[in-house]
Amino acid sequence: MAITSTVSADGSQVTIYIQGRFDFSSHQDFRNAYEKLAKTPSRFRVDLQGTSYLDSSALGMLLLLRDHAGGERAEIEIVNCSQDVKKILLISNFEQLFSIQ
């Protein structure tokens, strides 16, 4: 499991990349990816292209990101999901909370 992030040149968007399993062992790295930025971006993008699995703790971490980003005003995209990961997100009704691509 590896979590990395990049910030856009203007600092308005952070993209968080998650490789491998997205579970409780990722908790601190995931939080660090958006909490330790010098400036809070207005848009967040979570790229799950390399994510093979996520569990309920990962869903909770996405909700914490949403709270951090402003709750209902948050602009968060979840992109590049595999079919299995997308199925978990849809079963959990996360499409009502996030933009899922």
Image: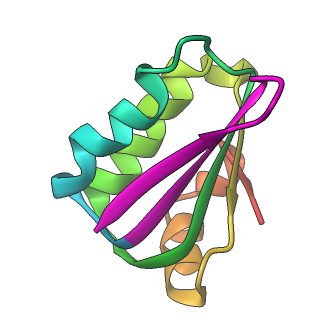
| Span highlighted in magenta in the image | 1-19
Query: Is 6 above or below relative to 95?
Result: above
Report x, y in % for residue 50: 50, 77
Classify residue 75 by image quadrant: top right
In reply to whether residue 11 is colored magenta, the answer given is yes
Identify the residue shown where x is 69% and y is 21%: 41
Q: Nearer the viewer, residue 35 or 90?
A: 35
The outermost residue toward the left is 25
Identify the residue shown where x is 25% and y is 61%: 23
How is the model colour-coded?
A: rainbow
Report x, y in % for residue 63: 46, 37
Identify the residue shown where x is 50% and y is 86%: 84
In reply to whether residue 61 is colored magenta, the answer given is no
Name the quadrant of the C terminus.
Answer: bottom right
Report x, y in % for residue 31: 35, 33
Query: Is 39 above or below relative to 80?
Result: above
Identify the residue shown where x is 46% and y is 52%: 4
Instruction: Give the side of residue 20 with respect to residue 85, left or right.
Output: left
Name the quadrant of the N terminus.
Answer: bottom left
Query: Is 53 above or below relative to 95?
Result: below
